[in-house]
Image (cartoon, rainbow, N blue to C red):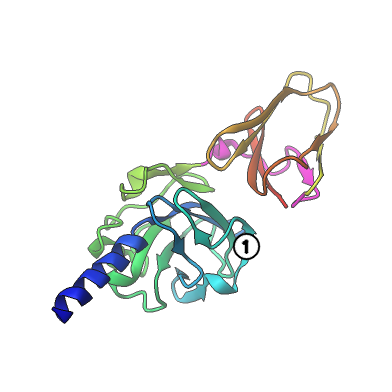
Amino acid sequence: MKKILLALSFLGILSLNAQIRIKMVDPSDNTVILRNYGGSTVDVSSYWFCNFPSYAQISGMAINSGLTNLASGEEVSITSSINFGTADAEFGLYTTNSSGFTDDMIDYLQWGSASHQRESVANAAGIWVTGTFLSVSPPFEYTGTGSENGVANWGTTLSVNDFSVNSFSLSPNPSSSILSLKFPQVINDGTLSIYNVLGETILNKKLPLNNALEIDVSNFNQGLYLVKINNQVKRFIKR
């Protein structure tokens, strides 16, 4: 009877861990968003990030928005204390820092090339297929519903592949009240849109004939947002 109870308890832990997925990774600033796709609350503060050979526990990282005690459908934005390579790297989410074991791996992705250190573990865990990798531009976004695995369920956020770092600037970032935008020149025909991380439109307006603009974000919920002007995208954090 004890063995049966232990087995059931272990399966319950696995079920809870399977609810959590990596929703978004931006290797340019080490931002990671985790989402709870399950029906039960899960505390992810004890989970570990790994970009081999570096490991770090979430409890020691900066939280941009949300809570590490994730209720069903909730997300948390985290600044990883581990640096990711923008062009080529891997990223794994684990329950422990012994990331060579399939039972400890919760989620995984790799970009730029295949054959990273923990690819074989992810393949054995049924999370990733050996030899596959993301070849799109970051940030990387999980597009599945929580149960789907593999490279086919990952893409790039909005039109970030058209992103130009010199197109416009945002300040202050993070912002709690007024977000200022500056453009290199007057935009004659432009549309500004702001999205949350779920892709929902928060604001959509035609740009004035000016090279600067101020937006009141004081009523926005705390979290990560995407500012899109025509085909150029940047991110800001509402505090």
Please give the name of the residue rendered at 28% of the width and 65% of the height, measured from the top-left corner: 12
Left or right of 6, for residue 55: right
Q: Residues within 10 Å of mark 1 (few under 14, many from 20)?
A: some
Q: 192 or 164, which lies in front?
A: 192
Left or right of 36, for residue 236: right
Left or right of 63, for residue 141: left
Q: 21 or 207, which lies in front?
A: 21
Coordinates of residue 170 in the picture (x, y in percent): 77, 44
Coordinates of residue 81 in the picture (x, y in percent): 59, 70
Q: Is residue 77 above or below residue 156?
A: below
Please give the name of the residue rendered at 38% of the width and 60% of the height, measured from the top-left corner: 108
The magenta span reads 157-175
Q: Secondary structure at mark 1?
A: strand
Please give the name of the residue rendered at 83% of the width and 26% of the height, measured from the top-left corner: 186
Q: Quadrant of the N terminus?
A: bottom left
* Secondary structure character of the magenta stretch overall: loop
Q: Which amino acid is tagged 1?
A: Ile
Residue furthest toward the top?
A: 189
Q: Is residue 136 above or below residue 48?
A: above
Is-magenta flag for residue 136? no
Coordinates of residue 61 in the picture (x, y in percent): 60, 69
Coordinates of residue 19 in the picture (x, y in percent): 37, 56
Q: Is residue 182 visible?
A: no
Identify residue for label 1: 63
Q: Name the image quarter holding residue 47.
A: bottom left
